[in-house]
Structures are given as C-alpha cells and as structure tokens.
C-alpha cells in the first residue's frame, strides 16, 4: 500500500518524440486513478515509467517514501496487468499464478495460500488445474489479474486490461475490477482510451492530450466542470453539443446568440459573474456547450422555459429507454453532419416526431458551458484566475468600482481608461477596500471567496474561510496589470527571475581520509554555473542533470534557472549584474537587475545602483534544459 508522487515528469523518446510533458500529480494511498485520453496522448508511457519499464527523462517519481527513478521494476513493489494477458500456454492456471512467486523462491505453503486466496477473490478456483487455452478471454484476464494480486504489490498498474474483451464482458469485468480494488485496499492506476471505463472506475481521472495533462479531477467534476472544450467533448456520451456564438450584456441580463441561426436566449448576468467582461460585448467568439440531457423537448418544460430555441428535426436514434433526437438550429442545416449548428437532444422514449418537424427546445442554461473560441479554455472556470474590472487612472490615482488607490511609484501608468487585471490570489482579507462577502466555498482544496464591491462581483482565493458580510480587502499591487484595447499597457512585476548557465565539472584538491590518515587527493566536484558565477551543486542535482542530458551533453547544454524575486540575496560575491532601477511598490521594494540579457526583479530593503552580486537559494531554484524546455529540478 502506497501513495505516489509524480513531480515534473517528462518522457522524450530517443527519436525526439516528447511523449509526456511536465506531469505533476500526487496520488494518495488506495486511490483508483485512471489515465484517459485518445491514442498516442502519453498515458501508457506514463504508466510504463511508473512501472520502471521506460526510463524517466526528467522529473522525480516517488512510490511510498522512496524515490524510484533508478530502482529496477522488480524492486518497485508494483504489479502490472497488460491488455494481452501473456499467460504461459503450457502451464496450468495455478502454475501461471504461482510462477512469479516461485521465481522469488517463496515457501510452497505461502504460495499455495496466496494462489488459492486470489483464485477465490477472482472466482476462478474451479479452473486452477486447467490450461489457459481452455478458458475464455475474460477468464484469462482474471488469471493475469491473479498473477498480479498474489504479489501483494503496493501499487497495481493496469494497461487497457479489458480492450480484448467483448462489450458485455467488459462491463462485467469493470465492476469486478472496481470490487477488487475495494477488497485489496491497494493503489490502482488504470490506463484506458474509453471514457466510460474511466468514469465508472476512477476515484480521480487524469485526462491527457498530446502528452499534456488537461485536467485531473473526480468523474463528477470532470463532467460538470470541464476545464476546456477538449475535456468537455471527451467526457460524456453523446458528445456535448458545441455551438459557436457570442455573448452580449444588456443591463443585468446577457443575451447569448447562436451563430448561423436565429437562435438566441437571455440569461441573468449573475450566472456569468465569472466571465471576463471583454467576452460580453457581443464580438468575441465563444463555444456554447450544452449536453443532450440539458435540452428538453418535453411540452410542459418547453412551455415553462424562458430559454428556448427552434430546432429542425432530422432523425432520431432509439436507444430503448431514451431517444436521441438529431436536428439543426439552422433551418437550412441537415442535422446529420457534425457542425456548429447540429444539435443532439435526449428525449424520453415516448417522443413523437418526424424528420422535418420544427420544434421548440428548452435549454437548461444553468448547465451551460462556455469556452473561449481561440484558446478553447472555459470562460466559466470554477476558480477564476483573474478579476477583470474597468478602471481609470489620473495623476497616479487608480479608480475602480467606486474605490480609489494611490498607485505606488513603481507603477507608471498614463492617465486614461483601462481594463484592470487583478489575480484572484493577489487579494487578501484585511486592508482598506470595503467589500461585501457573498459566499465562500471550498473547491479542490482551495477556498474561493465571492464578494461585491462597487456593484460588481469579484473573486478571491483565500487561505481560510471568510464569513459573509462586510469585510475589507487589500490588493498586492505588484501583481496587477492594465490593458488598453486588449493589449497590455502596464504589466505586473515579473514573478520569475530567469538566468542562464551550464553544469560545470572540476577536479579539486581536497583532504580525504584514507586508512585512518588524512591525505590530499583530487576529487570531482560539480557546480551550477549561473551567469558568470558558480555554486556547488548538490550531488543529487548533478546526478539528475547528468542522467537527463547524458554524460556527453551534460556540460555543454545550456541550462535555464528560474526562481522567485525573494530567492536571491545581494552579496559581496556571486552572479554579477547591474542594478538599473528600484521598483517601489510601497510596502516592498524590488531592485531591477540586468543579468545577462534578462531583467530580474529582486526583493531588496535598500535602493541599489550599478554593479551588484547575487547568491541564489539553491533549494528554490528550478533548473531547466533550455533547448528542450524540460524541467529537471
Ligand atoms: P497512449 O498510451 O496514450 O496511446 P503512448 O504513451 O503509447 O500513448 O505514446 C505517446 C507518444 O509517444 C505517441 O506519439 C507515440 O507514438 C510515442 N511513442 C511511444 N512509444 C515510443 C517509442 N518507443 N519510441 C518513440 N516514440 C514512442
């Protein structure tokens, strides 16, 4: 039994394919995790890296409390089940299950206990003396599960174990594997391309695409709160309907217009508080996502609905207990081809209609999903990253939502009107801007506080719960930015210091103890070259860099270092830079230092000018292979 931690895991195959990019996830003991995504998205590669069947190009993998990057598969305390059962045809079921244990020279009676117990759990006791060829596909897969169970592994890895089975058996085995997980109390990681399998089995699901994790969440949250159009379309059958359209705010209402159609519906603005105002002018394109079950043809529902649209029916699919009605919201559309006006509606089995009928359909707009047409990210995220508010600046005085703040000297913003971006996590409670807290909810371990200020709704990510009612907030002004006509006019202070350099190897003479005597000897030492300075590299860091870059390139390839503005200290020696300015944000000051070609903002308590030296906090430094953009530390 063990949890796993995947930290900045990458896989680059020798031919250059970047199969997995910056995979980060903490898996708790006993979870049932499913990796899902279309073929080629990197799920098997990730699983194989966990199993140790594939080298990890960069990153750190922990199973239990041990870093296992360099641990042999057989010593990782994992068991793996594959799609093809890979049973030995000449051995009986009993021998197949016992085989691995015999190799490990386990005492005979212990082997017997484990094999009979596993057979019992899997319901194959009566087949123990049979050969695999006498069994069906489902039974064979049970034997291969048995072979994994008897190892009593800390982690069970399953790579598409049910793909070879027919649909009925797959459904049955799905339930059995879920039951097995409950019984064994072991961490399961399961790979599948089948979203239904993922949804029915996982406690949490990782949706992947093109080597990148798209979203990690519970099945229900993936369904209800997809983070982007890909996840929204991948999870759920029939696929979510996606219409192109625009949003236009009119007073306290928002009109949602469907492109290539006369369809439009109006919803209260309160439903769309999280949407960035620039999406509400009626010109920025969005995808309007609605699932088939959130659209109704039921007469009463349609009669009572304030949000209905016209649909021209093309055909239907009878599924017994329900009917999928296909149609088009463009009266000239054909309803067959997937298009931005094609609509699929889930109707009861008693629905009566025929091709060509034009009907009203009621949309449950409480369930609507909206995505930016350009980035395909949700514009109604559960936790909005930014608040966007209109503001004006005059003589250094910032006015927004009936509040005025004197801008600190570091923010030089010309007079005029702007869109102000305030990160939700740059707002803290306590300060001097009065707000009215409306709600506070826990979302994926974070607390999202929703409050009113100057008639607008805003959001903050808070450390603790905040009670309803009048409160005061403050804003971290170094993190705000100003936009004019969609372009950044004044940016936030960069929160990252970027430096360049290389790994350095040197032989140094050191006193070493040998046979009880102290002798001078040459020893190899590794250093992180950063700018023109070098710092002793922790052994582990040097090892990881060499293993990721290969011995040949380890000392020639360029490295990029990143850290925060508080992670570098001014010193007498160290990385040379030139302080060119001091950014005064009121409570804090940051020295603007040129290092190489880059400008870094570094926390300082005094104004500095001219040549300076800096020493980084090595523990806080991210080390990245610059060319391939792979984070090693
Ligand atoms: P999935 O399991 O999601 O179908 P994989 O993890 O098998 O995807 O593959 C991810 C990507 O890596 C794909 O583009 C695939 O072609 C590539 N790939 C897989 N194995 C190798 C390999 N041994 N050498 C080079 N590329 C590979």
Image: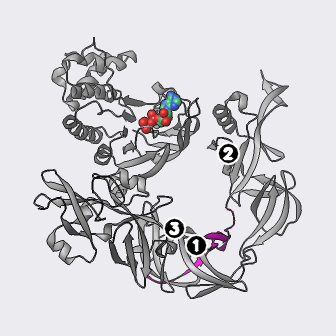
In magenta segment, residue 487:
yes
Which residue is the site of mark 3? 463
Which residue is the site of mark 1? 422
Q: Quadrant of residue 113?
A: top left
Q: What residue appears at the point 63 percent right and 34 percent down from the top-left corner?
A: 548
Instruction: Confirm or deny contact between disc 2 and disc 1 (CB under 8 A).
Output: no
Q: Nearer the viewer, mark 2 or mark 1?
A: 1
Does 136 sit above or below residue 495? above
Task: Give percent across and percent down for residue 295.
Answer: 25, 65
Quarter of the figure that contains the N terminus? top left
Which residue is the site of mark 2? 623
Q: Quadrant of residue 133?
A: top left
Q: Quadrant of residue 553?
A: top right
**Residue furthest toward the top?**
90
Does 383 sit above or below residue 207? below
Magenta region, residue range: 467-495
Who is closer to the viewer here, 241 or 466?
A: 241
């Amino acid at each position: 039994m063990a949890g796993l931690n995947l930290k900045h895991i990458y896989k680059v195959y020798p031919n250059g394919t970047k199969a997995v990019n910056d995979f980060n996830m903490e898996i708790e003991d006993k979870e049932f995790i499913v990796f899902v995504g279309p073929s080629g998205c990197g799920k098997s590669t990730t699983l194989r890296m966990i199993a140790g069947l594939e080298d990890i190009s960069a990153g750190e993998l922990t199973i239990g409390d041990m870093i296992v990057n360099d641990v042999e598969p057989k010593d990782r305390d994992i068991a793996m089940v594959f799609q093809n059962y890979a049973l030995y045809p000449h051995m009986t079921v009993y021998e197949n299950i016992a085989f691995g244990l015999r190799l490990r020279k386990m005492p005979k009676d212990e082997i017997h206990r484990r094999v009979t117990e596993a057979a019992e759990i899997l319901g194959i006791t009566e087949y123990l003396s049979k050969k695999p060829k006498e069994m069906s596909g489902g039974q064979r897969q049970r034997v291969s599960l048995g072979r994994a169970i008897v190892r009593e592994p800390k982690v069970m890895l399953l790579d598409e174990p049910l793909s070879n089975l027919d649909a009925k058996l797959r459904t049955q085995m799905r339930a059995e594997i879920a039951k097995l997980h409950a019984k064994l109390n072991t961490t399961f990681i399961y790979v599948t391309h089948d979203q239904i399998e993922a949804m029915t089995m996982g406690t949490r699901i990782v949706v992947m695409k093109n080597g990148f994790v798209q979203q990690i969440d519970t099945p229900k949250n993936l369904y209800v709160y997809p983070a982007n159009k890909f996840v929204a379309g991948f999870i759920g059958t029939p696929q979510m309907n996606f219409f192109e359209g625009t949003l236009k705010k009119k007073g306290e209402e928002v009109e949602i217009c469907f492109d290539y159609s006369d369809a439009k519906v109006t919803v209260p603005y309160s439903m769309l508080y999280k949407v960035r105002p620039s999406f509400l002018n009626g010109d920025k394109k969005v995808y309007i996502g609605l699932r088939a079950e959130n659209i109704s043809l039921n007469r009463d529902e349609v009669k009572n609905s304030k949000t209905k649209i016209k649909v021209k029916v093309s055909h239907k699919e009878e599924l017994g207990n329900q009917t999928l009605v296909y149609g088009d919201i463009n009266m000239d559309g054909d309803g067959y081809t997937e298009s931005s006006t094609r609509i699929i509606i889930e109707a009861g089995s008693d629905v009566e209609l025929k091709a060509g009928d034009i009907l009203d359909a009621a949309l449950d707009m409480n369930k609507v999903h909206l995505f930016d047409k350009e980035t395909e990210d949700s514009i109604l995220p559960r936790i909005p990253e930014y608040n966007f508010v209109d503001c004006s600046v005059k003589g250094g005085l910032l006015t927004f939502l009936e509040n005025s703040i004197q801008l600190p000297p570091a923010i030089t913003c010309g007079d005029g009107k702007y869109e102000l971006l305030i990160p939700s996590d740059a707002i803290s409670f306590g300060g001097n801007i009065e707000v009215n807290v409306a709600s506070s909810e826990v979302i994926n371990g974070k607390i999202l506080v929703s409050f009113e200020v100057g008639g607008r709704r805003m959001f903050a990510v808070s450390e603790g719960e905040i009670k309803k009612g009048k409160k005061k907030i403050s804003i971290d002004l170094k993190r705000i930015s100003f936009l004019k006509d969609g372009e950044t006019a004044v940016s936030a202070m960069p929160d990252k210091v970027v430096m360049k350099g290389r790994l350095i190897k040197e032989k140094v003479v050191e006193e070493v103890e040998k046979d009880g005597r102290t002798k001078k000897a040459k020893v190899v030492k590794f250093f992180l070259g950063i700018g023109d300075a070098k710092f002793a590299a922790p052994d582990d860091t040097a090892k990881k860099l060499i293993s990721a870059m290969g011995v040949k390139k380890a000392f020639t390839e360029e490295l990029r270092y990143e850290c925060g503005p508080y992670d570098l200290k001014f010193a007498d020696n160290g990385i040379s830079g030139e302080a060119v300015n001091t950014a005064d944000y009121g409570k804090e000051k940051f020295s603007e230092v040129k290092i190489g070609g880059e400008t870094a903002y570094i926390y300082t308590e005094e104004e500095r000018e001219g040549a300076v030296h800096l020493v980084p906090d090595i523990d806080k430094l991210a080390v990245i292979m610059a060319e391939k953009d792979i984070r090693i530390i």
